[in-house]
Amino acid sequence: MADFIQQIHLNDCLKLRKEVLWPSATLQECTEEGDDQALHFGYVKDQHIISCLSVFYRTPTRYQIRKFATQTAYQNQGIGSYLFKNVLQELINKQIETVYLNARTTAVRFYEKFQFQAFDKEFSKKNVTFLPMELDLTKWDMKTPTTK
């Protein structure tokens, strides 16, 4: 069966968030305010969601990406990048102008590859340090991904 990206249900995303981002948290603790209105996307392999992220509406032209997680066994294989590029392209298709996120400082280089830039100071939450980063989608020049 082929791998693919699709919009997924919040519950599927929560399981992966818990597994990858907060293993000691409950599913309820992995829920974010606005999750019920957010769009959740997943990379599906062999009928299992192995990477996911959530997209939150902020203004008609500005969205936020949150809670990006890829199963440990599939990290550093281009799967998360493929999902991320496809979601960015989807936002461009919806004429969204900017997207921002709070990058874990351990992932800043990953987001810089997609031309995200810091726009505020680092902050810490639950013993994790984040850097607010954003991307002007009207100037984004990544090629539309066709394969992972």
Image (spheres, rainbow, N blue to C red):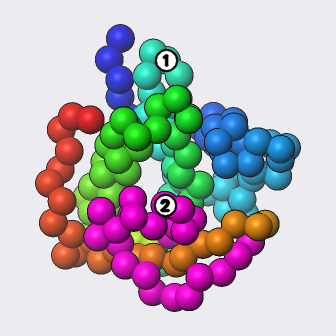
**Disc 1 marks which amino acid?**
Gln
Of residues 31 and 147, the one nearer the viewer is 147
Residue that label 1 marks: 47
Tell me where the magenta segment starts and ends, as one range.
101-125
Of residues 3 and 108, the one nearer the viewer is 108
Of residues 140 and 130, the one nearer the viewer is 130
Residue at figure coordinates x 21%, y 34% from the top left? 147
**Disc 2 marks which amino acid?**
Ala
Q: Where is residue 45 in the image (x, y as percent from the top left)?
A: 43, 22
Q: Is residue 37 left or right of residue 111?
A: right
| Quadrant into which the C terminus falls | top left
Q: Dot 2 surroundings within 10 Å: few (below 14), some, or many (20 or more)? A: few
Residue at figure coordinates x 30%, y 63% from the top left? 114
Q: Is mark 1 on a helix, strand or loop?
A: loop
Q: In this view, does 49 lie to the left or right of 95?
A: right
Residue at figure coordinates x 74%, y 53% from the top left? 31
Q: Tell me the distance, in whole angstroms, between the alpha carbons under discs 1 and 2.
A: 27 Å
Whether label 1 touches label 2, CB < 8 Å: no
Q: Position of residue 125 (x, y in %)?
A: 74, 71
Q: What element carries label 2?
A: helix
Q: Position of residue 50 (x, y in %)?
A: 51, 31
Q: Is residue 7 left or right of residue 67?
A: left
- Examine the image and state in which quarter residue 129 appears: bottom right
Q: Can residue 66 be seen in this view?
A: yes
Q: Is residue 57 visible?
A: no
Find out whether residue 110 is within the magenta segment: yes
Mark 1 or mark 2, earlier in chain: 1
Q: Dot 1 surroundings within 10 Å: few (below 14), some, or many (20 or more)? A: few
Mark 1 vs mark 2: in front: 2
| Quadrant into which the N terminus falls | top left
Residue that label 2 marks: 107
Residue at figure coordinates x 40%, y 40% from the top left? 76
